[in-house]
Image (cartoon, grey):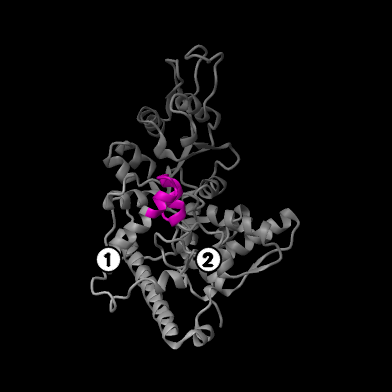
């Protein structure tokens, strides 16, 4: 089958090769093309996208395709600088302006005069620093910390954030006037989960790179693993994919991995990508109705398995000792394996051992008219209570044993009144 690749302009292809950008997703190519188009025009640019999606490449593209390409390019992580020193880092300070200022110092805006400055995580800037930055954008003027002299700089600002800026403005965490000044041109970077076959291309590229770096045979992925790569949600985007491939390159060198192998390297709490989620979600966005439904379905399956085993054991008792020896199921066969795909309070790999002594002594509903069948809530409550008792009331260990989050465990304890 012939695959039609999107038309890629020479400039976009050049940018991809120069900065090592892998992928042909239309949304990615559109973002690169937009960066190249705006590069020659001296406007502020705001780049948005999820953490790990590759926002840091686009300020470099803008700088390299602009008239400032021979001047300095400085990247600043605004979220990594303490609030008390951020003004000094950006705008400089005079000697004695604060404790520890043993000499005058140039800030990034003065150092990058004539070039480009990239402000990563710009939404983390304090409001006082935002006011200083707005003045630079509007007039090119700034004042060093501890100085009264106005200085000028000729600089282009490119900013990036993974924060919803409109929401930050509404909540008063970011100045509205600065937001509009920064976002003269807006470039949105697509998340990895929306880039389709780019995920497989990136995985192969990372696998080859790590095999060369560590001088080990390259691992490969079969069709099922490649399908899982594209179905997985990738909350950490390209950064997470690179981390997963690096682990597999080390521990699975020279092997062909299946989907089951790949799952061992993916966080269990991150489900596969489902664009549309049905059902009600809690305040934190978690779908508790879905979790409850999965728990109930698992309990129903267990109950059916136990009932069938009990019937088989009763039948062997009526057939006599010799026949019982022939037909009684072995202890190894009387184990129920919880389905791996079921998310519940039961550990997905734990087996429940049902011995003949435990099943034949218990009266069946037909034999005992007063027999009480536990409800689903009672079964779940008893399971959690026994686990809490086994772990001495330590909730962290209990949550690990039941293979659920501590938040879910706390909610269940409160719901069933199980505080020990």
Q: Quadrant of the N terminus?
A: bottom right
Magenta segment = 386-404
Around disc 2, counting alpha carbons within 10 Å, would you say few (fewer than 14), some (14 to 19), or many (20 or more)? many
Q: CA distance from mark 1 to mark 2?
A: 39 Å
| Residue found farthest to the left | 370
| Residue found farthest to the right | 215
The x and y percentages for residue 167 are 30, 45
Mark number displayed over residue 346: none
Closest to the observer, 410 or 303: 303
Main SS, magenta region, reads: helix
**For residue 201, what is the image quadrant?**
bottom right
Mark 1 or 2: the one toward you: 1
Q: In the structure shown, which secondary structural element does the residue marked by tag 2 occupy?
A: helix
- Could you tell me if residue 49 is visible in this image? no
Q: In this picture, is 204 found above or below 238?
A: below
Q: In the structure shown, which secondary structural element does the residue marked by tag 1 occupy?
A: loop
**For residue 137, what is the image quadrant?**
top left
- Could you tell me if residue 83 is visible in this image? yes
- The residue pinned by badge 2 equals 229
Q: Say whether disc 1 or disc 2 marks the residue closer to the N-terminus.
A: 2
Q: Are marks 1 and 2 in contact (CB under 8 Å)?
A: no
Residue 403 lies in the magenta-colored region? yes
Residue 80 lies in the magenta-colored region? no
- The residue pinned by badge 1 equals 375
The x and y percentages for residue 389 are 40, 49
């Amino acid at each position: 089958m012939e695959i039609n690749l999107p038309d890629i302009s020479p400039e976009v292809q050049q940018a991809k090769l120069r900065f090592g950008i892998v992928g042909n997703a239309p949304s990615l190519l559109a973002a690169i093309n937009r960066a190249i188009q705006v590069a020659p025009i001296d406007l502020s640019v705001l780049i948005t996208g999820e953490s790990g999606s590759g926002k840091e490449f686009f300020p470099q593209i803008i700088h390299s395709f602009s008239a400032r390409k021979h001047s300095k390019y400085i990247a600043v992580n605004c979220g990594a600088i303490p609030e008390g020193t951020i003004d000094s880092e950006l705008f400089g300070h005079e000697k004695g302006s604060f404790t520890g200022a043993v000499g005058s110092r140039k800030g990034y805006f003065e150092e990058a005069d004539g070039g480009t400055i990239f402000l990563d995580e710009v939404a983390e800037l304090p409001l006082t620093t935002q006011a200083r930055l707005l003045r630079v954008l509007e007039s090119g003027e700034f004042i060093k910390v501890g100085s009264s002299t106005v200085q000028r700089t000729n600089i282009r600002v490119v900013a990036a954030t993974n924060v919803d800026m409109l929401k930050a403005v509404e909540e008063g965490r970011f100045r509205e006037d600065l937001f509009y000044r920064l976002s003269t041109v807006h470039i949105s970077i697509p998340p990895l989960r929306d880039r389709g076959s780019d995920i497989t291309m990136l995985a192969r590229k990372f696998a080859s790179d790590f095999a060369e770096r560590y001088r080990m045979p390259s691992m490969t992925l079969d069709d099922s693993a490649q399908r899982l790569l594209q179905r997985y949600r990738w909350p950490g985007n390209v950064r997470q994919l690179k981390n997963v491939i690096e682990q597999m390159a080390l521990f699975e060198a020279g092997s062909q991995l299946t989907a089951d192998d790949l799952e061992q390297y993916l966080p269990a709490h991150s489900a596969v990508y489902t664009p549309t989620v049905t059902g009600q979600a809690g305040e934190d966005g978690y779908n508790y109705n879905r979790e409850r439904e999965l728990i109930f379905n698992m309990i129903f399956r267990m109950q059916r398995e136990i009932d069938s085993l009990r019937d088989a054991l009763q039948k062997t008792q009526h057939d006599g000792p010799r026949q019982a020896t022939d037909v009684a199921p072995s202890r190894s066969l009387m184990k129920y394996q919880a389905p791996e795909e079921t998310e519940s309070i039961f550990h997905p790999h734990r087996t429940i051992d049902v011995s003949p002594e435990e099943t034949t002594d218990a009266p069946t509903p037909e034999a005992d008219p007063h027999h009480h069948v536990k409800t689903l809530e009672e079964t779940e409550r008893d399971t959690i209570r026994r686990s809490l008792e086994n772990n001495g009331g330590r909730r962290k260990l209990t949550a690990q044993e039941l293979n659920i989050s501590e938040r879910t465990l706390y909610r269940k304890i409160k719901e069933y009144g199980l505080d020990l």
